Image (cartoon, helix red, strand yellow):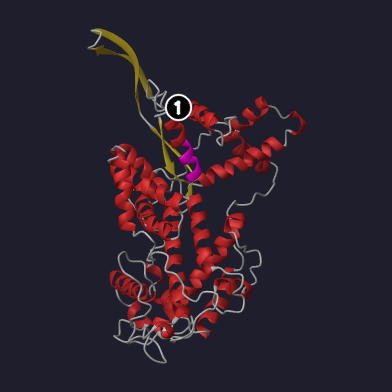
Amino acid sequence: MQFFSFAVGDVVTWHIEHEYYREMSMKSEVVPLGIVLYNENKGDEMVKIIDHMQQYVPAVEYSDECYIPSTMESVTTPAALLHRKLFGGDQLTAARVRGAQAAMCNGQTALKRLDGVVPVIEDWHTEVLLYEVVWKYFYNTGSAGEHCTLYQLRNRINRTNVVKNPKSNYNTCSDFFEVVVTGHILAAALDYLEISSLNDDPPEHVIPSAETLWTRNNEERKEVLTTISRRIVEKYMNVSFNEQHSGSASSDHGESSHRGGRSGCGQNNRDEVNNYSKHLLSIGCFMLQFKDAIKEGDGNRILRCWRYLLPIFHNSGRTNYCNEAFGMLCQYQYDLPALQAAQLLWSRCINTHGVRGRNIPFDLHLEHLNRLCKESIKGLHASKSKEAIVRCGKVLGTLDPLLAQFDKDNGVSQPSGAHKSPSFEKDLNVIVKELQEFEVFSLIPGRKHHSFPKPRDILHAKPSKPITAWVHEHLAQRYFV
């Protein structure tokens, strides 16, 4: 917005720093461990995979003497002290690791029991599932004629490659959702500031004029920007715990910004179009927060996002990921010692460029390595063998920089590797105008989308079992049964 660019543009915090910000902005050193030729879908082979990975676990094996009172004899038994390592993956991988450990729970030593690894859930596959949850509640291919729904906006900006299943085309759906959420943020800001265009100046009873604001010191201007942002969040979003969304938009001026009568007079007078847009904006801003926390490598913010993911997955019926979110929070709070809890928090991202704000989740980087490995194996043609495949896995750490240096020496241009988004600004303006034209942030009782007659607030929905009861039940099962 032109007003904020002029008045406070130089005091905006573009990168939220944290205690390890400098380290997370440095290039990560990656050491691929090769390819293990086993299938994790098979229980016995999953045991072999973990046993193979335990060679990287620091261990001290020793013999321990046990006295047996009934025979009055001493028996020497093997034992081991381990420095357990985190074993990351998606929900299915984590469940398979726990299954393999349960199958070997009667082993004589910690190594035989496969206790050297701690299964933990990673972030990228979780993010993909979160898009599936959003699509389930806000994306309906039958809503093409209902203005300002997700599918109608997809057609409005001609993003025809956005599909019903985000998992099959993640980047396209992610780009589309980001521009839609940004459009909702701007439309909400325009409504609050009482202006109709991104180039207009808001009235002085809402915010001081740009000329007055620009002359103030940096701290005062930051405070004004923070105050306006907080009021917009409080008026148009509902992301607080233990607060049920009321369906009304109380402004800080003491009046409800609606026309045509009171909101919430009855079920028939609710403005479900307004509720749909606010629910979409709320979950969208949460997802942007989650992605930004990953980009900055901010473990504390990622952990806070996981605390929100627990009720989101619980309310949307994603039982497996709900269990994983609960398990990860228990690992950090109770199960792991301080060192491993810190590793769980701060070892979730990798920076392959050495540029701030360019971290990616570990499991996404592994997908990149898998793609490079498959390309290498494909080049073997008829020479494919187990030995050749293992060699391809061993050279992954040097193959990529070697190919990049070869291309550089021969003048072959290389793409940056960053995903290129379509025309963001053009589509953003179209979405903002669409949202303004249909006044989605004004309360007009009685209107609704036929495809979404009662939009669901994912964070504050009322499932069959309340989240508190579910947590108490699982705490008892985890620690007292």
Per the picture, the main secondary structure of the magenta-coloured stretch is helix
Rendered position, 379 above or below 52: below
Looking at the image, which residue sits at the far front? 70
Q: Quadrant of residue 143?
A: bottom right
Quadrant of the image containing the C terminus: top left
> Going by the image, does 38 lie left or right of 290?
right
Which residue lies at the image location 25% right of the left edge and 12% below the top edge? 68
Taking depth in this image into account, of 207 and 52 the one nearest to the observer is: 52
Q: Quadrant of residue 382?
A: top right
The residues colored magenta run 91-97
Asked if one can make out residue 301 in the rendered structure from this viewpoint, the answer is: yes
> Going by the image, does 425 lie left or right of 253?
right
Q: Position of residue 286 (x, y in %)?
A: 42, 63
Can residue 92 be found in the magenta stretch?
A: yes
Q: Position of residue 137 (x, y in %)?
A: 50, 66
Q: Circle 1 sits on which residue?
A: 54
Can residue 411 be found in the magenta stretch?
A: no
Taking depth in this image into account, of 102 and 300 the one nearest to the observer is: 102
Asked if one can make out residue 2 in the rendered structure from this viewpoint, the answer is: no
